[in-house]
Amino acid sequence: MHGALASADRTAAKAGFGWFGIIRIGVVQAAIGALVMLATTVLNRIMVVELSLAAAIPAGLVAWHYGVQLARPLWGHGSDKGARRTPWIIGGLVVLAAGGLLATQATLMMADSFPTAFALAVIAYALIGIGVGAGGTSALALLASGVAPERRAAAAAVTWIMMVGGIVASAITVGKLLIPYSPARLFEVAGGLALVMVALVVIATFRLERQAGHFRDHDSHSPAPDFRAAIAEIWGETSARRFTIFIFVSMIAFSMQDLILEPFTGLVFGLAPGESTKTVGQYHQGGILIGMILAGVGGSAFSGKRPDGLRPWVVGGCLASGLGLGALGVAAVTGPPWPLELNLMVLGLGNGVFAVAAIGAMMGLAGAGETTREGVRMGVWGASQAIAFGLGGLLGAVGLDIARMALGDVGAAFQLIFAIEAGAFVLAAILAVTATGGAAMRASLIKRERPIRPGEQFA
């Protein structure tokens, strides 16, 4: 019996993750999304509405949690040096859950003792950033090293869709459980969410690494270099350096719209708060979901193992996003009867295609290092993405305020910001041509022939 199980493990390792294994990593991403949702939406609203605090306070705390994630390469390198990634995933989720509970407690204390509560919130949001960085980086590194090249686009689509699903499902559930609202009820719901998500991750990752393949182009038994040497190797590679810059530019463009889309629909198209939320959610977020599915299916079905197979999807997603933003710039000065819903759908479709294809390409390049492992590489790109997300949202909101004051016209201000975002996506498309080209990705798509024994892939 033991010999049969060992043989099955070796067969699974040679084939890499199947769809069930990919879904299990998707559960980790869903749990991360659900726990982060509590801090970025629920606690944000309570600070601004119930506690009447300045919106800059929760915005600054959210930006701080992104800033902490600059240390992602360190956590990724730590999981590379260890024998397994699962403890890093579970440990990251435990830290994230603890940070969410501490952030909830700090928020509830702000009404009575703001200085102490704010100091506690700074610590809490740092823990949230650490948890997201450690758990998320290790999960994506495990996926990158354990899934066959032809499945990478689909794997990226599955995990991102499940992350979005985790955010949506937890938002709906938490919203219902908080009726009627009370501080005690909020803490109980936050505690329940933390326990359920950590338990799900423990179950989802149980013996998961036994199914992992290992798709690298060199001997995985060579020792991983120290952190400084790993960073030097990555930044010394033209392809890795270009891809880091591409991620930074594209994610700034992707996130600049986050805080201004709903104000745009209200100020220019006159939609009420509920209508704007429904419209943006239904058409933009719906478009993102369709784009993710399209890129996941199409990228896997038509790209196969070709080194540059995902490049057309990355470039196409960037250009479609730029087109959608450029059209919104026209809408900003024309207003109704511009087809706002269709415009938002095109923008979301481009965003979804770009996001999945970029993550798939990232997983491909993650295994291309001579000595560095997937963890530190995913950490570098995760750090670039995190700082771009924090900076992009800030640039979009602050840029809009400055443009409104300088131009004296709301429509012209939105048009200028949307034009800048569209230009950033066009620049990202140009960068993607070289960053995800065949020469850059060829090394990452050579499959090891010898099956890897459990725990051996990170030795």
Image (cartoon, rainbow, N blue to C red):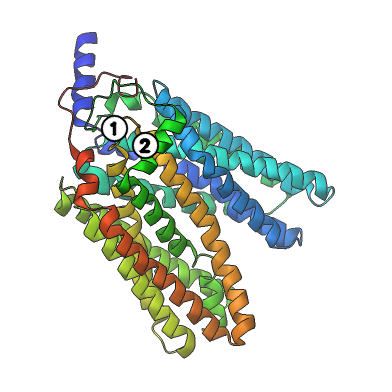
Q: Secondary structure at mark 2?
A: helix
Which circle's residue, 1 or 2, is located before the other in the chain?
2
User: Residue 416 vs residue 116: left or right?
Assistant: left
Q: Position of residue 414 (x, y in %)?
A: 52, 79
Disc 1 designates what residue?
370
Q: Is residue 285 above or below residue 172?
A: below
- Residue 310, compared with residue 285, is above or below; it is above
Residue at 48%, 41% (x, y): give it: 31
Which quadrant of the structure image shows residue 192?
Answer: top right
Label count reads 2
Q: Is residue 197 at least partly visible in the picture? A: yes
Q: Position of residue 291 (x, y in %)?
A: 31, 61
Q: Give the class, few, some or many, for how many residues have Cα within 10 Å of label 1's Cα (few <14, many ≥20).
A: some
Tell me where residue 292 appears, x and y as whole percent.
32, 57
Q: Residue at x 67, y 47 (%)?
A: 186
Residue in front for this viewpoint, 374 or 235: 235
Looking at this view, name the residue that lies furthest to the top: 2
Q: Amino acid at mark 2?
A: Glu
Relative to the observer, which residue lies in front, 252 or 240? 240
Please tell me which residue is depicted at 42% across the width and 89% down the height of the picture: 337
Q: Quadrant of residue 393?
A: bottom right
Alpha-carbon span between mark 1 and mark 2: 8 Å
Name the image quarter holding the N terminus: top left
Front position in the image: 344 or 181: 344
Would residue 26 be seen by someone viewing this image from the given angle? Answer: no
Quadrant of the image containing the C terminus: top left
Task: State the residue at coordinates (73%, 63%).
Answer: 54
Q: Nearer the viewer, residue 312 or 441?
A: 441
Q: Amino acid at mark 1?
A: Glu
Question: Which residue matches tag 2?
Answer: 233
Q: Are marks 1 and 2 in contact (CB under 8 Å)?
A: yes
Counting from the top left corner in percent of width and height, residue 85 is at: 41, 27
